[in-house]
Amino acid sequence: TTEFRHKTLTATFLATPRRGTVLWAKIVAGIVVGVGFGIVGALSSVGPAAGFLTVFGIDTDLGAGSTWALIARVVLALTIWVVVGIGVGTLVRNQVAAVVGVLVFTQFLEPIARTAGAFVEGLDTVTNYLPGAASDALVGASIFQMAGAGASTSGLEWWAGGAVLLGYALVLLVLGYALNWRRDVS
């Protein structure tokens, strides 16, 4: 969205007139940044936590493959969220609207819907396919499941959650490309 806000997209498209190439470059750069931030985030949280647990004689399970699989899924989830963000930025040209829209949906509307799923029969089967629920399924943890509210514990498998979240990213990217990316930018 900053390209639209600061009008730098015009210069980019003049230098590289193939807009699809520019979008692919953004996606590849986003994936690299997402993986990098995911690894840094995992190391900065798992490292100190493992040290803390070790001091108190609690097993960290860092030797277990399932622990490393969980960490890898966290990095994957963050990376897919970066691509979702690129899709939102491609679809919504106004930076403030994009940020506010994402925050309203992920921090207000989706949590309400997922909490309502605990009280409305059948609603949790729908809310399992919302982006946050899909991300929770991919990672294998959810505050809603731990609190006993919202999505049922029999939600999506981790791989299905990843596929749903990736589907959101792809839909947003395709819509953004089709509706906005090919339009005149000046």
Image (cartoon, rainbow, N blue to C red):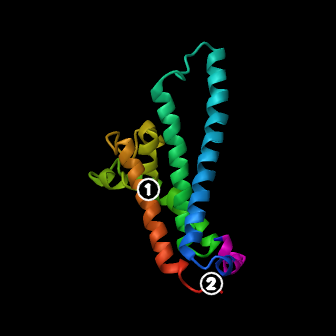
Does the segment drawn in magenta span residue 5?
yes
Q: Which residue is mark 1?
A: 166
Q: Which residues are magenta?
A: 2-11
On-image quarter of the N terminus: bottom right
Residue 170, compared with residue 162, is above or below; it is below
Nearest to the observer: residue 54 or residue 160: 160
Is residue 115 visible to us here?
no
Q: Secondary structure at mark 2?
A: loop
Q: Which residue is mark 2?
A: 185
- Between the C-alphas of marks 1 and 2, the distance is 27 Å
Looking at the image, tell me whether mark 1 or mark 2 is earlier in sequence order: 1
Is residue 135 visible to us here?
yes
The number of numbered discs placed on residues in the rendered structure image is 2
Q: Locate residue 179, reporting x and y percent.
A: 48, 79
Q: Locate residue 183, reporting x and y percent.
A: 55, 84
Q: Secondary structure at mark 1?
A: helix
Q: Are marks 1 and 2 in contact (CB under 8 Å)?
A: no
Residue occupying image coordinates x 61% and y 31%: 46
| Disc 1 residue type (three-letter) | Leu
